[in-house]
Amino acid sequence: MGGRFSAFSFVDRITQVEPGLRVRGTYRVPPRVAAFPAALVAEAVGQLAAWASMAQLDFRRRPVAGLARETRFLREVEPGDTLALEADLESCSADDVAYAGRASVDGIAVIVLEQCLGPMLPAEEFDAPEALRGDYALLCGSGAPAERFTGLPALDLMPGAAIPGQRVSATLQVPQAAPFFEDHFPRRPVFPATLLLDRQIRLALELARQTLKPGAGGTLAASRVLDVKVRSFIAPGQSLELAAEHVAGADAWTAKLSARAAGKPVATARVEIAERRPA
């Protein structure tokens, strides 16, 4: 894999494949990274499903982020943890791939994805198909070099207008250049939707902390993300306007998430925030 898959690649080995049906793999979070956000665990499951769907279509097509009905965040992942990754393909065609997936650590589930749908586009727009075939063969064989990921660059939010307890907004300036673009993707750099979701969740947590007070030893964390819809690609250098708005009357503390670029919708979702206590 060399340097091509070192900055945003979260599958070390593919350990089991039932073509067109399911795939299993592993990823060890490097112990030296400061943290490994839950959104990156979701990314790892999505990447595993992507490898399986690309292989099914001989790497002529590749999936991109689209829809995710539900993602449940069950516990934190720590540096040094080894993720056992699973993805079940519900359908796979030249148009799209539908899948569900999960990740666990030491047999305990840490994340579950349900009803995900990724549009399929020509693979050659994003990467060289022959290179992808070689990378897949390596993943199914000896595996990728260990501990390639060294962390993410700073992606700070610039605070915007706010209504205390009801709504917060912020601006995210996508970098013009960053190491993760080398993986995502070599021929067409795209800002990863999971990194956008991570920043949206952080904004929602900022809003939740204004009204929710965890008990002693507890912290607030995203417990569930619903109805993720990615509407367009995010190019390097784009400026994104993010917002989180509290939804009154929901069973759990919930916020609507939105991202816009030049006034046009880029991504929407809902997130539920709950107290999490140490295991």
Image (tube, rainbow, N blue to C red):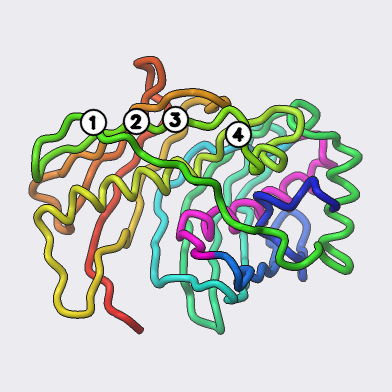
Residue under label 2, please give it.
Answer: 171
Q: Are marks 1 and 2 in contact (CB under 8 Å)?
A: yes
State the image coordinates of residue 90 (x, y, percent, origin top left): 60, 52
State the image coordinates of residue 231 (x, y, percent, origin top left): 46, 27
Answer above or below: position of 176 versus 229. Answer: above
Q: Residue at x 34, y 27 (%)?
A: 241
Query: SS for tag 2?
Result: strand
Query: SS for tag 3?
Result: strand
Q: Residue at x 65, y 71 (%)?
A: 28
Q: Which one is earlier in the sequence, the residue at label 1 or at label 4?
A: 4
Question: Between marks 2 and 4, how big is the CA–CA gap?
Answer: 28 Å
- Closer to viewer: mark 1 or mark 4: 1
The crowding category of the residue bearing disc 2, from other C-alpha atoms within 10 Å (few below 14, some 14 to 19, many at least 20), is some
- Closer to viewer: mark 2 or mark 4: 2
85 or 23: nearer the eye?
A: 85
Residue 173 got which mark?
3
Q: Is residue 84 magenta?
A: no
- Amino acid type at mark 1: Gly
Where does the magenta region start and end?
A: 34-61
- Amino acid type at mark 3: Gln
Question: Between marks 4 and 3, how big is the CA–CA gap?
Answer: 26 Å
Residue 19, image quadrant: bottom right
Q: Are marks 3 and 2 in contact (CB under 8 Å)?
A: yes
Residue under label 1, please give it.
Answer: 160
